[in-house]
Amino acid sequence: MNETPAIRLTALRKSFSALTAVDGVDLDIRAGEVVALLGPNGAGKSTTIDLALGLARPTSGTAELFGGLPRDAIRDGRVGAMLQGGALLPTLTVAESVALVAAAHRHPLSVAEALERARCTEIARQRVAKLSGGQLQRARFAVAVVSDPDLLFLDEPTAAMDVEARRTFWQSMREFTEAGRTVVFATHYLDEADEYADRIVMMARGRVVADGTPTEVKAVVSGRRIRATAAFAATSESQNALANLPGVRSADRRGDQLTLVSDDSDATLRALLAAHHDIHDIEVTAHTMDEAFLALTEARETEGARS
């Protein structure tokens, strides 16, 4: 059974004079997915969101929400958005701002419920002009969810939030997604993508360079990292021996702390332990999201410079 995707982008392209911001993006996002858009500044994340929402007209290609035009889904209250350029009227209170947007929809949440979902109850009577950066982001989130949407777009939602505010925000987001809603969020925080997204779409120079689960994206950077405490003497001979162990791509020794990057961690460990019985505190880890991010975006930047 073919289910209509919540979002379908087909050969999507957007150019501004000589600059191509989005360059042939093909993307299907299923209902109920939580998808992170990752990429450096200028990668095309925000423009892709604008195109998906119908806020910008593509140079070529198409964008569909729930199988139809974006404006139809938005008119029906099925889509909420928290965008970087979105502004609230400074003279209104947070509650008044939410009520104003709720009045434009046929089946909104109550203002009280939207405020509660966004953890804004305690700032409901504060005027927008008096809010801190983190409080303003929470107020914008309350405005985005008051229509009770099936699909939510978030562009850098935790910008200007401190660590505790970010944690609170994602707690409220978990409650939203547990009901099977679809969420697409652009972020610079790689830990957020790794922890909260079901799927990561990584962009560079307007193109998708990786698309998969966080584990699959991290696996793009081959190999594993082996860390251990080494009691044997650090000499040029021992350094060369470490570099020549099976599977090792790089070996680093700082004091008694040893770090190896290996394409075959099992073979490396067997050889290392056979040669050095005094190795201890061994830790084997996969590469981080940061490393995958850098490897994939740098590869695309290099490719773009050559083209």
Image (tube, rainbow, N blue to C red):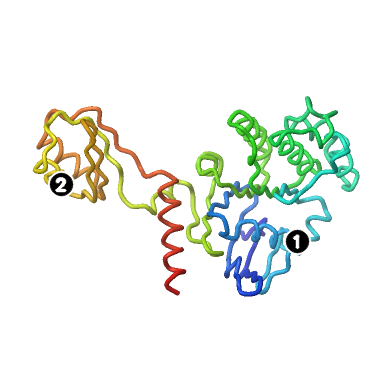
Mark 2 nearby-residue class (10 Å; few <14, some 14–19, many ≥20): many
Q: Which of the 4 image quarters holds residue 165?
A: top right
The residue furthest front is 130
- Mark 2 falls on what kind of element? loop
Q: Which of the 4 image quarters holds residue 102?
A: top right
Residue situated in front as seen by the camera: 162 or 140 = 162
Left or right of 216, for residue 73: right
Is 150 located above or below residue 207 in the figure? Answer: above
Mark-to-mark CA distance, 2 and 1: 55 Å
- Disc 2 target residue: 245
Residue 105 x/y as whole percent: 87, 47
Q: Amino acid at mark 1?
A: Leu
Q: Amino acid at mark 2?
A: Leu
- Mark 1 falls on what kind of element? loop
Left or right of 223, for residue 148: right
Q: Residue at x 14, y 49 (%)?
A: 244
Residue 201 x/y as whole percent: 54, 55
Return the mark for residue 122: none
Residue situated in front as seen by the camera: 55 or 257 = 257
Residue situated in front as seen by the camera: 38 or 162 = 162
Indicate which disc, 2 or 1, sits on the residue closer to the N terminus.
1
Q: Residue at x 47, y 47 (%)?
A: 214
Q: Split into 4 quadrants, where in the image is the C terminus?
A: bottom left
Is 11 located above or below residue 38 in the figure? Answer: below
Return the mark for residue 55: 1
Residue 97 x/y as whole percent: 85, 39
Residue situated in front as seen by the camera: 197 or 60 = 60
Q: Split into 4 quadrants, where in the image is the N terminus?
A: bottom right
Residue contact at pointers 2 and 1, CB within 8 angstroms: no
